[in-house]
Image (cartoon, helix red, strand yellow):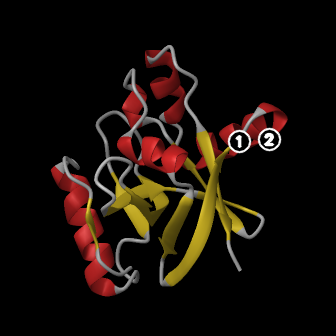
């Protein structure tokens, strides 16, 4: 991913994860192992999403958990249930052309927000790979967006 940098203000664990991912070319970090108090250990697939900053025009990398849909990917704009959307989501609303790295596979994609029955189906799929999304949704009044990253061939 050329000329992109880690997004500012990422938590330390996300920065460390993204650095490992980038340094290994995607062989280390694709499957993220996480242990949280009072929860079973989870192994979650993660990708690196590169967006263009809506204000700065700079390219930023965000590590996100993901699922597959067809030839593309789904990611969830949860921000842990915060009242506002994450910066990466606001970036893709301004410019939906993104780059994705899932493991060692890199691709260009166009991001779009799922709606209606597609969103409902993909939300259930997201809960399978990251069950805490349900708790995040309960913490916020906004509907947490489910984003489809359609690969551009």
Q: Is residue 15 above or below residue 19?
A: above
Q: Residue at x 46, y 27 (%)?
A: 136
* Label pair 2/1, CB-CB below 8 angstroms: yes
Q: Quadrant of the N terminus?
A: bottom left
Q: Is residue 87 above or below residue 134?
A: below
Q: Residues within 10 Å of mark 2 (few under 14, many from 20)?
A: few
Q: Residue at x 16, y 52 (%)?
A: 12
Who's the residue at 30% across and 62% down the image? 58
Image spot of residue 63 (x, y percent):
37, 59
Seen in the image, is 129 located left or right of residue 31?
right
Considering the numbered disc 1 on the image, is that residue within a helix, a strand or a loop? loop
Which quadrant holds the C terminus? Answer: bottom right
> Which quadrant would residue 109 be assigned to in this image?
bottom right
Residue count near mark 1 (Cα–Cα under 10 Å), binned few <14, some 14–19, many ≥20: some
Residue 90: image quadrant is top left
For the residue labelled by badge 2, is the local secondary structure a helix, a strand or a loop? helix
Residue 147 placement (x, y as % from top left): 61, 47
Q: Residue at x 36, y 86 (%)?
A: 25
In this rendered view, identify the residue nearer to me: 153 or 66.
Answer: 153
Q: Which residue is mark 1?
A: 114
Q: Which residue is mark 2?
A: 118
Residue 97 location, x and y as percent? 55, 63
């Amino acid at each position: 991913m050329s000329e992109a940098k880690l997004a500012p203000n990422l938590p330390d664990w996300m920065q460390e994860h993204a650095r490992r991912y980038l340094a290994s070319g995607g062989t280390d970090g694709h499957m993220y192992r996480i242990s949280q108090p009072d929860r079973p250990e989870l192994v979650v697939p993660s990708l690196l999403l590169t967006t263009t900053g809506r204000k700065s025009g700079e390219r930023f990398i965000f590590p996100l958990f993901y699922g597959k849909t067809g030839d593309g990917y789904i990611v969830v704009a949860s921000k842990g249930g915060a009242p506002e959307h994450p910066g990466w989501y606001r970036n893709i609303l301004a410019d939906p052309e993104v780059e994705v790295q899932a493991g060692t596979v890199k691709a260009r994609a166009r991001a779009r927000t799922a709606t209606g029955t597609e969103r409902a189906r993909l939300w259930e799929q997201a809960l399978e790979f990251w069950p805490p999304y349900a708790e995040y949704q309960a913490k916020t009044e906004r509907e947490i967006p489910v984003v489809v990253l359609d690969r551009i061939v």
